[in-house]
Image (cartoon, grey):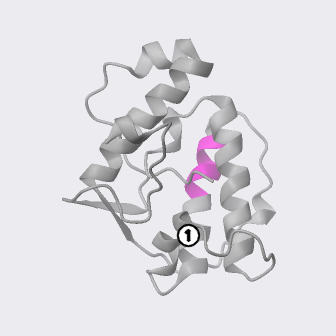
Amino acid sequence: MRIWSLHPKYLDPKGLVALWRETLLAKQVLEGKTKGYRMHPQLERFKRTGRSLDSINRYLTIVFQDAVDRGYHFNRDKINWKFQPVKMTVTTGQLEFEKKHLLAKLKARDIKKYEELKDNRIFDVNPVFDIVDGDIESWEKINATNKHKR
């Protein structure tokens, strides 16, 4: 499960669809509707707000709007639009990690998108996040395939 801190506009079509599906799964977990993934580290950022359903629904609105802007037809009924706005934080280290991780994914599966983004120094963040100084988030899973991105 990858719930990006970066703005979804940087994702290729496959990545955007995966983000939508994975965030909907995360929402189901937070709603207590599934037993799988309950301890997934990516959920921590939503749980620590104290208003996890508000925060995940707000996050989904950004993904949904990006999809609409691209001409996709994601199901708006999957979002509870009555959420209370919640701000979350993301660290500068996490953003740098995700930037490198995304570029590696794009290089492998969408070279045109990779070429478009590879020289970007600054990537916009999903607007639900405020940026704070810091290392990679404690909930980020570092494994053999992405540890070089630290």
Q: Nearer the viewer, residue 87 or 142?
A: 142
Q: Is residue 36 above or below residue 148?
A: below
Q: Position of residue 150 (x, y in %)?
A: 31, 42
Q: Nearer the viewer, residue 62 or 22?
A: 22
- In reply to whether residue 121 is colored magenta, the answer given is no
Q: Is residue 60 above or below residue 68?
A: below
Q: Nearer the viewer, residue 98 or 122?
A: 98
Q: Position of residue 26 (x, y in %)?
A: 67, 66
- Overall secondary structure of the magenta section: helix
Does residue 5 appear left or right of residue 83 in this picture?
A: left
Secondary element at tag 1 = helix
Q: Position of residue 86 (x, y in %)?
A: 45, 75
- Residue at position x 47%, y 87% from top? 50
- Residue at position x 77%, y 48% from top? 74
Q: Is residue 102 above or below residue 141?
A: above
Q: Is residue 41 above or below residue 140?
A: below
Which amino acid does the dot numbered 1 rest on? Leu
Give the residue furthest to the bottom: 50
Give the residue furthest to the left: 133
- In reply to whether residue 62 is colored magenta, the answer given is yes
The magenta segment: 61-67
